[in-house]
Image (cartoon, rainbow, N blue to C red):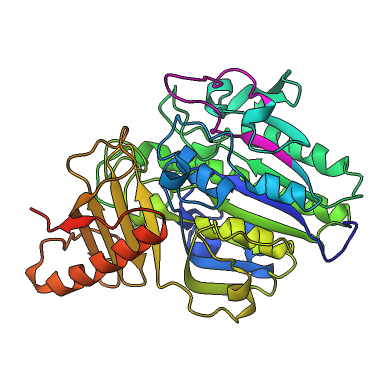
Amino acid sequence: MSADSKTPNILFLFSDQQRWDTLGCYGQPMDVTPNLDRFAAEGVRFENAFTCQPVCGPARACLQTGKYAAEVGCFRNAIELPLDSTTIAHRFSGAGYEVGYIGKWHLASTKGGANYREKAVPPERRGGWKDFWLAADVLEWTSHGEGGHVFDADGNRVDFEGYRVDCITDFALDYLRTRANEQPWFLFLSYIEPHHQNDRNRYEGPPGSKERFADFVTPGDLADTEGDWRENYPDYLGCCASLDRNAGRLLDELEKLGLAEDTLVIYTSDHGSHFRTRNPEYKRSCHESSIRIPMLARGPGFRGGKTIKDLVSLIDLPPTLLDAAGVEVPSSMRGRPLGPLARGDAENWPEEVFVQISENHVGRAIRTARWKYSVRAPEKRGWDDPASDVYVEDFLYDLEADPHERNNLVRDASLTSIRAELAERLKKRMVEAGEEAPEINPAG
């Protein structure tokens, strides 16, 4: 138990590139996530959860700072988190927490500048995670599905053998077992699974994944499409099943150590995967397969097997964590605490989530209960430009009639007024995120 039972420990479990529909509690028909399903049944499940940026590094910058990626400056991969950033680690340290980080960081290197992809991240580039560190900046550069290494706080290489999810979890279990529990702790555990292994151009599930999940049920957005899901989806589910098994190990250990009651556990992901059906790679689009994610919470303030239907974002998690720990939420954070939703007393909750998109293109999108509306900047480059003052309408989907986003209505003349309304809502969200209100022109 933490020193003050009203001050929860926090265990943040972060997967990479995991679609929401890989979990049974979100409708996955195969037996992939029994532990997380049970976890959701005991805690709170956010039915409609979305990333605020469907790219690894930018999503992490949002989560660490509570600000949108373009505002932080990390609008794409390969941009380091500014050294003067105030992160959740700094804020929790200031509140008396021990802060620890294990796994993938992805915020220390800049293309053409500092490169820590294959060497230890120095202390000043760890975003304030100062008390415990066992990580690699870009974990896929120092490991594969089987075997690899991370670096400890002193910069020493720490090798591991076996399936990567198991080994990263072993490090976390060692951490939990060696806490003196004289002060509350916050452990951020960042996996790379089920992200594809870049240098091998495939997903790497544990042995037996292809056989175990050979008879998968094709998600509706993938059916009758090209892409590489046919060969990769069994291994993708295998990665997710491994994450689930290891989440179960961690939850069991919390029980064994008598920490479960006073520990807030969050499970979520940075973005999803469309398996090269929407563009030449896996994410970087406005579609549900890219932006919709699992989000589960269990612990103080998040109990009872509740399902929340309101639309929530990754940007809401930094203020949620601070609020749950009784730490003041700074006005600089763009999201809102999720605790009031879990308690049922939230007021004026936003009716859309806002998404910034980079690398593939410079894009902005909102997702409402019914509509998906996305714009792109035709004169800008997604790798070079964080934003634009002119956008063109790109996608409009009626999610009630077309949940798998097969029919783009962006040129439908009967929906001109709908697009105009959504454009104004998008502009408002952009301004709230620190951007200038842009010009949005019709498609074509």
For residue 313, side relative to residue 142 (left or right): left
Residue at the location (66% across, 58% down)?
A: 321
Q: Position of residue 377 (x, y in %)?
A: 21, 46
Q: Position of residue 141 (x, y in %)?
A: 53, 22
* Res 368 quadrant in image: bottom left
Q: On screen, 65 above or below 209?
A: below
Residue at the location (92% across, 45% down)?
A: 180
Image: magenta residue range:
100-122
Q: Position of residue 318 (x, y in %)?
A: 60, 55
Looking at the magenta stretch, what is its main secondary structure?
A: loop
Residue at the location (89% across, 57% down)?
A: 1
| Nearer to me, 174 or 351 | 351
* Res 36 quadrant in image: bottom right
Regarding residue 247, the answer to whether it shows in the image is no
| Nearer to me, 441 or 361 | 441
Q: Position of residue 9 (x, y in %)?
A: 78, 55
